[in-house]
Image: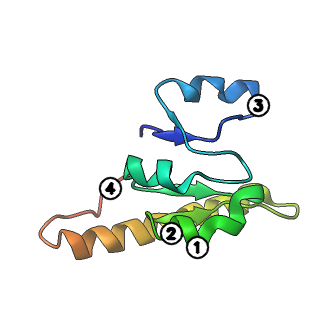
Amino acid sequence: MKIAGLPDKLYVPELAGLKDGAEIVGTLFEPDLEALSALSPDLIIVGGRSSPKLAATSRIAQSIDMTMEGDDLFAQAKQRLRHIRLRIRTRAARTHPARSFAHAKC
């Protein structure tokens, strides 16, 4: 999976390598909706500070809010990823009914 766009600052040194080849698409607080739209992404992930923009990013592409709260962050992340995987498969089946997406890895 190629990451097409990222916020201007990641604040975590371990993620610095993700910026190679990725476009800047706003900040953690304010996604640049024009820049996101220009990328024609398959998926937009918001969370935390950018989560209030979920409705706006959903008009551009499939979007998911990965904001985590509480103690079991790993279980929350898995649940959200399962949900988005199902949504992607459902959309793909409607768009390309002749294809089989049973083994698609999302």
Which dot, 1 or 3, sits closer to the camera?
1
Q: Is residue 106 visible?
A: no
* Disc 2 residue type (three-letter): Ser
Question: Marks 2 and 1: CB-CB under 8 Å?
Answer: yes
* Disc 1 residue type (three-letter): Ala
Which badge, 1 or 3, is on the more N-terminal residue?
3
Which badge, 4 or 3, is on the more N-terminal residue?
3
Q: Give the residue at mark 2.
A: 58
Judge by depth and name the residue closer to the eye, 66 or 102.
Answer: 66
Could you say which disc has been placed on residue 12 in the image? Answer: 3
Could you say which disc has been placed on residue 55 in the image? Answer: 1
**Residue at left offset 64%, top offset 41%:** 7
**Residue at left offset 51%, top offset 23%:** 20
Judge by depth and name the residue closer to the eye, 98 or 35.
Answer: 35
Q: Residues within 10 Å of mark 2 (few under 14, many from 20)?
A: some
Measure the C-alpha gap from mark 2 to mark 4: 22 Å
State which quadrant residue 79 falls in. bottom right
State which quadrant residue 77 falls in. bottom right
Question: Where's the C terminus, which quadrant?
Answer: bottom left
* Whole-percent x, y for residue 38 in the image: 39, 49
